[in-house]
Amino acid sequence: MMRLFKVMFIILMTFTIFSTTDVNRGEAFTNQVIARGANGDDVIELQARLQYISYYTEKIDGKFGYGTYWALRKFQEKYGLPVDGIAGASTKKKLTSVSTYHKEFVMEQLNKGNRFTHYGGVALEEQVKKGTGTGTGTGSGTQTNTQLPTKYSDQDLKLMANAVYGESRGEPYEGQVAVAAVILNRLDSPEFPNTISEIIFQPRAFTAVADGQIWLTPNKRAMEAVIDAMNGWDPSENALYYFNPDTATSGWIWTRKQIKTIGQHIFSI
Amino acid sequence: MKKLTFFLVYTVIVFSIFSYTTSIEKTNLKQLLHAQYTNKMAGASSQLNELQKAVQQSLLFSDPTALNDSLQDVWRLSSDIRQTIGDLPLDREFTTQWMNYLGRLGNQAKLTMTTEESKANWNKSVTNVASNLSSFSSEWDVATAHLLQEDKHYNKWLDQLSNMDVDSNFTNLSASVKSYTESDFPLTSSESDRQKKKDLQALKDQPISEKQALARFKEMFTQYDKATIRIEESAKTAPYPFYHITFHDGIRLGYADITKKGGHLLSYLVERPVDESTLSQEELVTRANKRMNQLGFDDLKIVDSRENTMAWHLNYVRINPDNKAKIYADGVQVKIAKDNGEIIGINSMEYIQKETLKNQPMKKINWKTFFDKNVEIVEEDLAYSENDKMEERLCYELTVVYYNKNVPHTFRVLVDTETAEIIKNEKL
């Protein structure tokens, strides 16, 4: 009787654990074809599933780069699929059938900014590297949901978004892109420091640094403006400076050659 | 009444103590800053002397090792002084000019360590650099002498340091350094070409009127026929003249800049809400290609695509019709909305003035001996890229993959077709 009770208890516990864990073996991807350059939840699932069956060993970050590309090709080769590094319907179907995706676990770790793996055969709680998480459990991971040109990092994006928001949040979108472009133009200029953080924190360079507004949380619009500037847009037309003529106290800034006015700012070199 | 008097007296005493404490703190902070700035300034003076010595020492040697030691000192010291100057609240124009000069000096020293040609150039220009640095050092000592003396009036001290007055010592120093930069490190011809390309001053096309620019805009973007449009010319001091068009049409708000000479599109960007993505990456790229062709960009090839929150950013490059090589310097960037595939941004600033390409021999390179045996070439193409001397060189463009402990690392390597020099090695 006691033995039967034990067996029943184990079955019940296993069933409970299984039903509360968000395991996905069936259709989960969207209908989109995923290829290099893509970004987002579908890519997270692709990487996690490939990692579950040991084809992908790099960081799960939702960015379809070369690491994901080679892992996918290897998977396609192994399962006799057309080897093109593109996750179309047949590849996704096969991958779903041979792997498992713990969506809730993966998304939670990503939001926390934790370092983790998604290997099959390893208990979920053992996959998170203790003490390495940079987040607080409130979605403060260090990565951003973007694909940037290789020369820029997520940290550059965050820092620039803070500067753009602090300096020009009341300006039209074009004006915000222009402010971001000025920072990047300084990066190319021999007259300014060589890194984005040095440019932003150069003494007396930006008002937002001096008055602390740089530490305000930027909105999506400021982030988008920085992404556009990083991708090449420069509405300032190669400006190195800008100022608000109503509030500028420096006489020097008026000696610069002006290019154009956007919103409240005059852009100059 | 007694209570009120007590309260008032108490308040006054508390307020006085608070004001006194704050004032003491402020004074302490000022003194601390003053001391730090003075320290930095004294540091800059001694570093400047060291730099002067290092430049002079580099004149002594023809032995490569000894010369390299002096050059390394020049490179390190120029970087140290840049750092120190950057920390000081000096006149901005002076700081800018001085940092520019030091940057060029450091770069030249670094380049001299690596190439024979640069060594000859260094020997030619270093005599001038040494003498200019020497006179600059004297001027710097004069300008900073009284600032290094004890002065209890911090505000006055700070005013003198960051003086914008045309007659200030620092403005004079700035003028001197500017003239040194021009004489010691003139822009190379390639740099000038690059600058010309960037500032588009060299455009030879006929100027167009404001009306023609507007017509050009409406011809390219027919959807804004009924939009509220504003057009204005760039400032008179802008390095190249252009028309700045801003438009507003329902949920769409955007701008387009068009050159005055020739009416070329510099850039175009629209801000509008973007709904959920419904189109595939392939479909979006097809639409972008078609639209770019309609806009007259018919010699481009897509080389990169990146998905972001609302849009995809696509990178196009011009293709040389003769050898089908990609010309990265003649690039166009496109932003395409994820919801309906509308082009919401074009940046064609670099495409307006096409690179002048020279004929270049193509030597066969044995990749098996060129790369490590564990490197696999997965793609081979031709592309133009800029070398250290800022010349456009024809290169073999190789995408290679290297497995380290089963982790693939992908690189794009550009190898000069004539000299086999690696022009670029980029981790993908």
Image: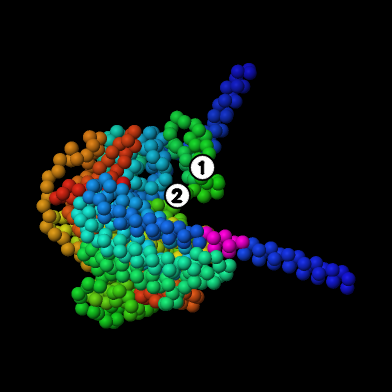
Assess disc 1: are there few (<14), some (14-19) or many (≥20) residues with their C-alpha within 10 Å of its C-alpha.
some
Q: Position of residue A86 (x, y in %)?
A: 30, 45
Residue A224 located left or right of residue A139: left
Could you say which quadrant of the image residue A186 lies in? bottom left
Q: Earlier in the sequence, mark 2 or mark 1?
A: 1
Residue B12 in sight from this viewpoint: yes
Q: Quadrant of the N terminus of chain B?
A: bottom right
Q: Which residue is mark 2?
A: A143
Residue B287 image offset from top left, x and y in percent: 28, 60
Start and end of the magenta stretch?
B28-36
**Residue shown at the point (45%, 56%) measured from the top left:** A158
Q: Is residue B302 left or right of residue B84?
A: left
Question: Depth check: B248 or B183 in front?
Answer: B183
Give the residue type that dot 2 points to: Gln
Q: Secondary structure at mark 1?
A: loop
On whether residue A58 falls in the magenta region, the answer is: no
Q: Chain of mark 2?
A: A
What is the quadrant of residue B212 in the picture?
A: bottom left
Please, which chain is the residue tagged with disc 1 on? A
Dot 2 surroundings within 10 Å: few (below 14), some, or many (20 or more)?
some
Name the mark on residue B369: none
Residue A172 higher or lower than A151, as above or below: below
Res. A244 visible in picture: no
Q: Which mark is residue A133?
A: 1
Side of B296 where A133 appears, left or right: right
- Out of B333 and B240, give the one closest to the viewer: B240
